[in-house]
Amino acid sequence: MERGALWEYQVFCAVAERQSFVLAARALGASPSAVTRAVQSLERQVGAQLLLRSKSSVVLTPQGESYFQSARGLLRLEGEAREALRDTQLGAQGRLRFSAPDLLGVTLLPAVLRRYTAEHPGVTVDISYTDKWVDPIAEGLDFAIRGGFPASSDLLGARLWPYARLLCASPDYVARMGLPREPEELGRHRLIMHTGPRVLKDWHLRRDKRIVRMHAEPAVRVSTGSGLMALALQGVGIARLADWAAAPEIARGTLVPVCPGYTATSAQGAAPQMHAVYASRTLPARARAMLTAIRECAEDLQRQALKR
């Protein structure tokens, strides 16, 4: 690694994160003795011992714990400034890493990626599809896409698009079991649900100003959005699906709306939204371009749905 003005901060953070001078030296491409000298120099400058060393372990002192957070923040700011300068000179370049809900991987994102990779050949893309809550800082991601209702956190957020949650079933299921038109009828039907921690709650179904609360007892639970969609398409039961995923299937006739006119909302009647969360106010050009491409594709789908 290039030894610039922030070399000693880089070394200190590497040792603190790995709890080892040897492992830090390997990661930095330096000798253990050079790493030791860099940490000792930093400790002399700040006038405090930052690390406690023994034959078996390296741990932060109380002063080191506090200084580590500041040093890591400084390195992040320097990296963002360097990234912004590179973006100005070269445009979207480098490796883009983000996470997204599983169902986006089989609906909207393939079309986005086809256009994005053609327009930005200098970017390599690494996507983690998961319905679990992901911390982009801990996972080293540029951002994480989430659905539902944004949770309060220290992260920054960008609204991508609002959507509605619809209850849907296959024509085969409706032919066998009938079409519920009011929420009170759902108790006699087989419900299939997502196992996400923020999903297994009472359903609140809204039509105009009326909100009906019902306790949903699932006959089948599944851990992914694509799995939920597949079960609905196979006629296993009634599923709660985002309109951006359900609308194309409804248009093809492979799904039909259940309780027509109702949408699933929060207890207060609010509609969910897709959003991205990230740690830095200065996103690299590659990330900004991807978020723009996702918004534009979602808007195209919504316009197409309105025409149907």
Image (cartoon, rainbow, N blue to C red):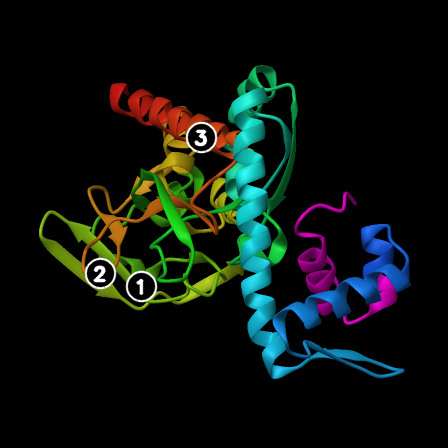
Task: Determine whether 98 is above or below 50 in the image.
Answer: above
Q: Check disc 2: other Cα within 10 Å, few if <14, some if 14-19, many if 20+.
A: few
Instruction: Report the residue marked by disc 3.
Output: 294
Q: Which mark is residue 187?
A: 1
Nearer mark to the viewer, of 1 and 3? 3
Secondary structure found at label 1: helix
Asked whether the viewer can see residue 34, the reply is: yes
**7 inside magenta stretch:** yes
Q: Amino acid at mark 2?
A: Glu
Secondary structure found at label 2: helix
Q: Check disc 3: other Cα within 10 Å, few if <14, some if 14-19, many if 20+.
A: many
Q: Which mark is residue 184?
A: 2
- Side (left or right) of 97 relative to 178: right
Of residues 236 and 77, the one nearer the viewer is 77
- Side (left or right) of 164 relative to 173: left
Q: Amino acid at mark 1?
A: Gly
- At a point 19% along the width and 55% down the height, the residue shown is 269
Residue 194 coordinates in the image, percent (x, y): 47, 57
Of residues 50 and 180, the one nearer the viewer is 50
Query: Is mark 1 in CB contact (under 8 Å) with mark 2?
Result: yes
Earlier residue among tags 3 and 2: 2
**233 inside magenta stretch:** no
